[in-house]
Image (tube, helix red, strand yellow):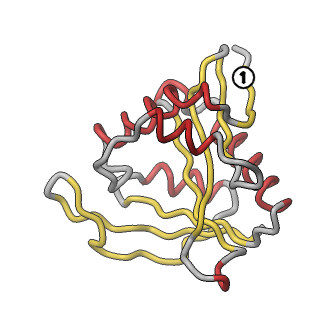
């Protein structure tokens, strides 16, 4: 099954929204409850450069995952630190696509002068903690019960990697 990692294009927006919305609707992996629209994603992908990278993973010509980053916190002192997001459709997991997305994202982040990538991970997603640890991220904190979804309090696990 041929796969590849590439820069996202506006025509990928519906696939990206489908992946993100499945996780928003069906899991506690994100504390977000508002689904994303393909139109909003397409608008972001049409922004002029430089913008944070937005990569997709393809499997057999279909978009099955994505990764991007954005500001960790406001203010110029944080400009070299970014928080990333990576999401894969369930059938794409365990195929090395997540690793490929993160390697590509890290390379692009370094080229943009990013020094640290931060992962904010739901305590309901222990596989994401293991995934990030395998990629050299270190657990730097746990914020108990800062997220709430489906009438459950959830912890936020913070991991980071210096590039």
Residue 151 sits in quarter: bottom left
Q: How many marks?
A: 1
Q: How far across and how far down the image is residue 53, in percent?
A: 70, 49
Please say if 43 is above or below 62: below
The answer to whether 71 is drawn above or below residue 17 in the figure is: below
Callout 1 environment at 10 Å: few (<14), some (14 to 19), or many (20+)? some
Seen from the viewer's position, the closer of residues 99 and 85 is 85
Residue named by callout 1: 3
Seen at 78% across and 67% down, the residue is: 163
Measured from the top left, where is residue 125 in percent x and y? 40, 52
Residue for point 72% across, 74% down: 80
Residue 2's quadrant in the figure? top right
Specify whether 6 is left or right of 92. Answer: right
Q: Is residue 130 left or right of residue 45?
A: left
* Residue 71 placement (x, y as % from top left): 59, 67
Q: Could you say which is closer to the camera, residue 161 or residue 65? A: 65
Q: Farthest residue toward the right? A: 111
| 109 to 25, vertically: above or below | below
Observer-nearest of 15 and 9: 9
Q: Looking at the picture, does residue 21 appear above or below residue 123? A: above
Q: Secondary structure under badge 1?
A: strand
Name the residue: 43% across, 29% down: 18
* Residue that extends furthest to the bottom in the rendered view of this protein: 77
- Residue displayed at 31% across by 75% down: 144
Please state, as top left, top right, bottom left or bottom right, where the N terminus lies in the image: top right
Where is residue 59? Give x, y as percent: 65, 20
């Amino acid at each position: 099954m041929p796969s590849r990692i590439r820069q996202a294009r506006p025509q990928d927006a519906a696939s990206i929204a489908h992946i993100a919305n499945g996780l928003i609707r069906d899991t506690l992996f994100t504390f977000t409850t508002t689904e994303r629209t393909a139109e909003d994603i397409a608008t972001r992908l049409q922004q002029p450069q430089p913008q944070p990278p937005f990569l997709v993973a393809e499997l057999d010509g279909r978009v099955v995952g994505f990764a991007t980053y954005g500001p960790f916190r406001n203010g110029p002192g944080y400009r070299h630190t970014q928080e990333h997001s990576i999401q894969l459709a369930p059938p794409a997991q365990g195929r090395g696509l997540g690793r490929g997305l993160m390697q590509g994202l890290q390379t692009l982040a370094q080229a943009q002068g990013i020094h640290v990538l931060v992962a904010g991970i739901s305590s309901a997603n222990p596989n994401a903690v293991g995934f990030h640890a395998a990629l050299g991220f270190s657990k730097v904190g746990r914020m108990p019960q800062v997220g709430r979804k489906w009438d459950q309090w959830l912890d936020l696990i913070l991991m980071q990697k210096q590039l």
